[in-house]
Structure formats: C-alpha cells, structure tokens
Image (spheres, rainbow, N blue to C red):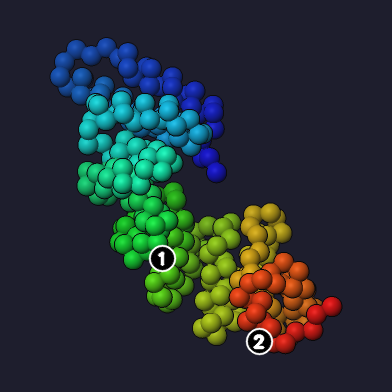
Amino acid sequence: MNRYGLPLVAVLLSSILAACVTTTTGPFTDKISKEKAVVSYVKLGYAYLENGHIVKAKKRAERALELDPENPGAHTVMALIWLQEGELELTREHFEEAIDNGPNEAKPNHYYAEFLMSQNKHEQAIEYLKRVSLMLEYPDRPKVLQDLGECYYKTDQKELALASFKKSQKLDSSQAVPHYYSAELSFDKGEYGYAQRSFDALRKLIAMGRGTHTADSVYLGIRLARHFNDKKTEKAYVKLLYRNYRDTPQFQAFMNTYQPFLR
C-alpha cells in the first residue's frame, strides 16, 4: 500500500527544484545546500518508487548518490528499485552499503531484514529487526515487531515470537497478523483467555475487510470454540473449513482429530 500520494510527489518536486537553484556564497553554504538537495532527492525517490514510477525514482536516487556516494537513504532507494527489477545481488549490495554507512538508520535495517525474510533467511533477519525494534520513534515499529515475531516463529523460538507479537498488538491493533499468531501461540501455551481475545480481534478486522481467514485461522477458530464449548461457532467454522479448505493439511488434521459432523 502506498504511503505517499501523488500530491506529495508534486510538493517534493517543488522542494527539490528550490533546493537545486539555491544560491550559495561559500563552502559552508555550499555544503548545506548539497545536503538539503540530497535529502530532497531521496524523499522524492521514495515517493516515486511507492507510486510505481521506477525510472523517475532511479534518476533521483542516482542523483543523490552523485552528490553523496555514501548516503544510506539513496542506497536504500536503489536497493528497493533493484529488488523490484529482480536483481537480487544488486539489492543486497545496496542494502549492505546503506547499513555500513548508516548502521542506526531505521529504514535500511528494516527493509533489508524484510528482504532477508523473503529469501527465507529468518535467522539473519533477526539481527537487523532487533536493532530497529529499539528505535522507539520509528513509525513502522509495530511492523518491525510483527516481522521479528515471524522470524522467531520460523526459527522455532516461540516464547520470543509471542512476546514480539504481543508488543506489536499493543502498538497497533489494526493489523491482523499479530492477532492471529498471538492467538495461536497463546492457545498452544494453554493461555486460552488471551488466545480468545486475540482471535476475537482478528475476527473483527476480517469482518471490516482488513484481513482474511486462512486454513490456519479457521482451524484455530474451531479449536477455540471447542475448548469453550461454543458449538454454534464451532459448527460455523467447521462448515467454513469444509467449504474452502478441504485440500489443506489443516482440514486433514481436523478430520483425524475431531471426526466432524458435516452437513
């Protein structure tokens, strides 16, 4: 989902043009003007990229790197561009360059971690996500904690996964993924009350169109309903599982475990 709208692109374009025509009179003001231009080019690069204007984004990122070859933001934009173009080695190189030059910059660490996750390198991603999770002012921190929870989950560190998902829930209750995993992991621990509350939050988001059920979530709904002896809800989820997910391991597990009545 785009974070920037087209009007912002126009605003940024105006800003960068202003930066480029700034008149300077000495080395100090030249430096200030160049730094402002680099910031503007990077912001504009992000804006173009997130609106799908890859060529324009690349031009701005390249211009920023001409002015400042070590700029972490410009390298991050270039990494994201190469990722979209399927050039994974160039993606990795630019992310690593960004982090080398800005180890405490949130975006390069977060986006590189997500890149590593996409390559099933969850153990490596944890290092970068842990770093960003401590940056309390980073606006995407709830997503960082969600990603960290998923990495812990994938590497069978379930206690750490649950702790990360719970933190993500507290910071932003509008995301479906932390609610699901918190419900599942809490259920497995025998924390049925918390599991049910998390699952109820997930159901509300799905009802609002802000998430969708999966075979996992439907099967979890059945198990929760059975635990709390909620036969009406159990029956509804059994029908949903039968109707939409008959070819899944979750359906087979349900058949083997509960021998359901199906109508």
Read off the residue under disc 2.
256
Residue type (three-letter) at the residue carrying disc 2: Asn
Front: mark 1 or 2: 2
Judge whether 218 appears above or below 105 on screen. below
| Front residue (pair 211, 135) | 211
1 and 2 marks in contact (CB < 8 Å): no
Read off the residue under disc 1.
151
- From the top left corner, tell me how far across and down residue 142 is, in percent: 47, 57
Answer left or right for 46 relative to 262: left
- From the top left corner, tell me how far across and down residue 90 is, in percent: 31, 42
- From the top left corner, tell me how far across and down residue 209 is, in percent: 69, 54
Judge whether 172 appears above or below 56 on screen. below
From the image, which quarter does the C terminus lie in? bottom right
From the image, which quarter does the N terminus lie in? top right
Q: Residues within 10 Å of mark 2 (few under 14, many from 20)?
A: few
Mark 2, secondary structure of its residue? helix
Q: Residues within 10 Å of mark 1 (few under 14, many from 20)?
A: many
Q: Residue at x 58, y 56 (%)?
A: 174
Q: Residue at x 57, y 68 (%)?
A: 180
